[in-house]
Image (cartoon, rainbow, N blue to C red):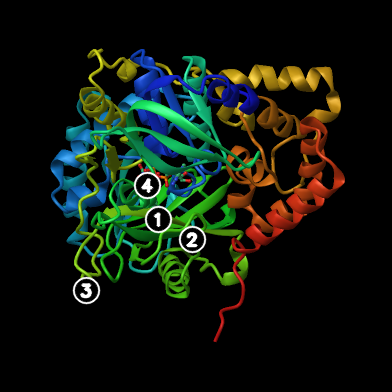
Amino acid sequence: MRREIMLKAIKDNPDKVWDMVVIGGGATGLGTAVESVTRGYETLLLEQADFSKGTSSRSTKLVHGGVRYLAQGDISLVLEALHERGLLRQNAPHLVKDLAFVIPIYEWWDGPFYAVGMKVYDMMAGKLGLGPSVRISKEETLKAIPNIKKKGLRGGVIYYDGQFDDSRLAINLAQTISKNNGTIINYIKATGLTKNELGLVDGLVAYDIENEKEYKIKAKVVINATGVFVDDILKMDDPKAKKTTRPSQGVHVVLDKEFLQSKSAIMIPKTDDGRVLFAVPWHNKVVVGTTDTLVDDASLEPRALEKEIEFILKTAGKYLSRAPRRKDVLSIFAGLRPLAAVEENDQSTKEISRNHKILVSLSGLVTITGGKWTTYRKMGEDAVDKALLVAGLEEKPSITKNMPIHGYVKNFDPDDHLHVYGSDRLAILQLIEENPDLGNKIHENLDFTKAEVVWAIKEEMARKVEDILARRVRALFLDARASIELAEKVAIIMAKELGKDKAWIRNEVKEYTALAEGYILKKPKN
Ligand SMILES: Cc1cc2nc3c(=O)[nH]c(=O)nc-3n(C[C@H](O)[C@H](O)[C@H](O)COP(=O)(O)OP(=O)(O)OC[C@H]3O[C@@H](n4cnc5c(N)ncnc54)[C@H](O)[C@@H]3O)c2cc1C
């Protein structure tokens, strides 16, 4: 998976007509391109930044049916997501693991209510269930989560869902596309659509940000999978197009594992204001979130609002015996969910369905929006089913339901931090064998080694320090301060591998530091 080689596919073949061109390299675009290429269609995917730079690296990291959607009565969404949860666990076992979630019970009537609700959740998963939910005593709840607040605790309910590493899955999907002869390019932005004499979309204009070069690309169908940016592409098609999407922001804070002291997660189905709160162990830290706030503008680097930070810390403090303070926050990240546009004065995002939608414009542009990471495969399948009709392509059946994703391995040691690389782990160990210095860790607070940096550059199309620290080894999300401290070391390794000079190193460190500062929780502004 080398960028230069991928780029050559469009550089050397200006007249090539691709079967499907996908705009957007998040979960939705990658899932769509996997679907298209594995059905045998000639596929190109363009991403304006790095793969999963948008929402797809900022999720709660759950592969789940969505207990909250069950509470809202969105049965079809939960059924679909539970089914997809099972398939993803089957097809990418190195990245998706079962996780026990404890719902602590403080009011007596909540006990039977959640116990019955979770039995329904188990039943809906059918054969793809991860384990039966059970009601547990106060003592068992404290054993499962030693740091849960004791006062008023009556017991709990344990249920099972899946957990994953979102941006690592995105990279594995990119590798799956590449392995199946698809073409995927990062740092190339779709800047316009081209149309034939009938007004039908027949390709697009793309700008290669690295080489500052424009390309005209021909396609039988173009698929807009740009998350909260779908309206920008719809406007390229029709400047008068109505707004379809409004971003809803979710925020997470990352804390030291001491705050949870458990391998299980906590799920609070109903906080004071009716929202859901998770505290989930992840890569030896704890991710706590999330909120849901409608915001006006889509951004690739959304920032947490002060009221969201306050809500998470205050609410977590109500359930954890040690309340987290601002200075305990190792990283804070925000993500934007593309929700169907609603009335201006409607601030309730909880009630808007998370089902995905596919729009086909009069010009033939196919847009896919909404959904969840968990359902990315089904979204891709549905988008390709529509797109092939628009393109007039021969119908070929989907094979992704039972198709292993790149990296697939079944037996691994979950305590070996290289396990997220799946089958690539051996190749990384080989790099270390050839050059033992690569086996050294770069920062005492983080597990990853120099070998993973080299691997990310050579095999995972990492182009910038941010690509490595944010989305290949997750340092930005796990400990933003530590990640700044090691940015220069990473830049030096990258410069050697990519043939860059000292000015490049300086600039990368400066850019990365400015970005990572936004993940550090500062004193509130008055
Ligand atoms: C806070 C939060 C928590 C969540 N937690 C979960 C969870 O635990 N489990 C779960 O299943 N789901 C979760 N979700 C939902 C899930 O993360 C999203 O549904 C999914 O990531 C959306 O993917 P996407 O590809 O549609 O959008 P994105 O990931 O945003 O991808 C769109 C991509 O398009 C690119 N792009 C935009 N314009 C252009 C252009 N002109 N040219 C080229 N590229 C372009 C962007 O750079 C971006 O990378 C969560 C969502 C949020 C907001």
Quadrant showing the C terminus: bottom right
Disc with the residue nearer the chain's start (4 vs 1): 4
Q: 518 or 182, which lies in front?
A: 182
What is the residue that sits farthest to the front in this orientation? 197
Between the C-alphas of marks 2 and 4, the distance is: 14 Å
* In this picture, residue 255 sits left or right of residue 310: right
In the picture of the structure, the residue carrying the numbered disc 1 is 336
In the picture of the structure, the residue carrying the numbered disc 2 is 302
In the picture of the structure, the residue carrying the numbered disc 3 is 345
Image spot of residue 327 (x, y percent): 62, 69
Which residue does the image show at 36% across and 16% down from the upper left?
A: 41
Three-letter code for the amino acid on which mark 2 is drawn: Pro
Look at the numbered disc 1 and say if its residue's Cβ is closer than 8 Å to ligand 1. yes
Labels 4 & 1 near each other (Cβ < 8 A)? yes
Q: Is mark 1 on a helix, strand or loop?
A: strand
Q: What element carries label 2?
A: loop
Look at the numbered disc 2 and say if its residue's Cβ is closer than 8 Å to ligand 1. no
Image spot of residue 230 (x, y percent): 34, 48
In the picture of the structure, the residue carrying the numbered disc 4 is 227
